[in-house]
């Protein structure tokens, strides 16, 4: 199986339904594959209804306040081993919002899990198709002792603010903003807990979805929620200067939407890609960092540090969207 080049970064509903039914499927995963629903903090929705055979993974264990960046590598490794995940695992992810599954999927790829797939259409499409659901708590994972390869295997898949700045000085470097148009032009930050509007100077707009919905990736989706083809995404990216010959880091507010863009670029075989983990939240939190806005001619005001209670809205916003 070639886990790098796929015609689409997601797997189809009939494929997963067949796999769960024990039928032979093309491009089958490893025998000890896992189906994981990604949630945020509260397992109650999973307990009410989930895809049979799925276990639950709390994304809040993989990122941390105040900026919702990835947890330290040692902590990430601990969580993955606790969930029985290692370098040779085959993992199928879904969630109540595609961006949550993509965020976890990207971190698994960063860690070195070789086979990571996303369910096309997510749980909503599974429900609409009338496919079976079950209730009850997540079964316990069987932990593994070792990851099986150097950790993380792909540190280049994630960059920090210092590296983002360095990338912008490269002749072939691109920062791709996976944000709504209103966010990109500085009309809104998009988030209740990010007080500053604007954009990173020189960033290219990679599009996202509906303004006012930080989970929306409607520019990447068909009306029924299924994901558009990589060719369709490549077309509007290239119009905005986002092309495979450049070293490209995708970012959004805190990394969720950017992770889905990363999956697309990886499916298309782009060789030099990453996610800027801090995104607009971290960049805009430091008043030293330059900012631009199409709607404001004056410099942005000093950034206020959001209270912890406001930052915690990150979790509920993604969960309830």
Image (cartoon, grey):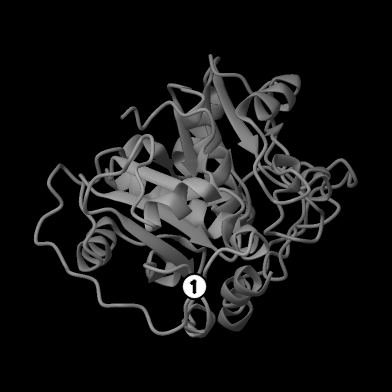
Which percent across, then down, holds residue 179?
71, 46
Give the class, few, some or many, for how many residues have Cα within 10 Å of label 1's Cα (few <14, many ≥20): many
**Residue pointed to by mark 1:** 50
For image coordinates 38% across by 64% down, the residue present is: 62
For image coordinates 73% across by 59% down, the residue present is: 196
Q: In this view, which residue lies farthest toward the left? A: 145
Q: Exactly how many numbered labels are in the figure?
A: 1
Which percent across, then down, holds residue 193?
67, 70
Which percent across, then down, holds residue 106?
43, 47
Instruction: Residue 16: tell me if it is visible.
Output: yes
Instruction: Residue 277: tell me if it is visible.
Output: no
Q: Tag 1, which secondary structure?
A: loop
81 in relation to 119, above or below: below
Using the image as rendered, state which of residue 42 and residue 168 is in the foreground.
Answer: 42
Using the image as rendered, state which of residue 170 and residue 48 is in the foreground.
Answer: 48
120 in relation to 303, above or below: above
3 on left or right of 239: left
Q: Quadrant of the N terminus?
A: top left
309 in relation to 236, above or below: below
Q: In which quarter of the image is the C terminus?
A: bottom right
């Amino acid at each position: 199986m070639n886990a790098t080049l796929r015609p689409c970064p997601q797997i189809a509903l009939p494929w997963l339904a067949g796999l769960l039914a024990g039928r032979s499927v093309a491009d089958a995963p490893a025998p000890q594959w896992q189906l994981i629903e990604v949630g945020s903090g509260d397992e109650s929705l999973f307990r009410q209804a989930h895809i049979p055979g799925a276990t639950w993974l709390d994304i809040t264990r993989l990122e941390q306040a105040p900026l919702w960046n990835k947890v330290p590598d040692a902590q990430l490794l601990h969580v993955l081993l606790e969930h029985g995940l290692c370098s040779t695992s085959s993992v199928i992810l879904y969630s109540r919002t595609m961006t949550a599954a993509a965020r976890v999927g990207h971190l698994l790829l960063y860690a070195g899990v070789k086979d990571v797939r996303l369910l096309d259409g997510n749980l909503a499409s599974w429900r609409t198709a009338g496919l079976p659901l079950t209730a009850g708590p997540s079964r316990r994972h069987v932990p593994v002792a070792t990851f099986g390869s150097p950790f993380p295997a792909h540190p280049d898949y994630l960059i920090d603010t210092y590296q983002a700045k360095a990338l912008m000085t490269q002749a072939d470097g691109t920062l791709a903003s996976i944000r709504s148009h209103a966010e990109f032009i500085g009309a809104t930050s998009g988030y209740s807990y990010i007080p500053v509007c604007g954009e990173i100077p020189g960033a290219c707009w990679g599009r996202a979805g509906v303004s006012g919905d930080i989970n929306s990736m409607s520019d990447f989706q068909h009306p029924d929620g299924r994901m558009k083809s990589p060719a369709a995404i490549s077309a509007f990216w290239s119009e905005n200067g986002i092309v495979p010959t450049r070293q490209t880091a995708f970012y959004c507010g805190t990394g969720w939407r950017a992770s889905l863009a990363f999956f697309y670029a990886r499916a298309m075989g782009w060789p030099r890609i990453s996610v800027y983990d801090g995104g607009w939240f971290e960049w805009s939190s430091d008043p030293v960092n330059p900012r631009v806005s199409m709607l404001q001619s004056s410099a942005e005001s000093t950034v206020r540090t959001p209270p912890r209670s406001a930052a915690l809205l990150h979790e509920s916003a993604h969960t309830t969207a």
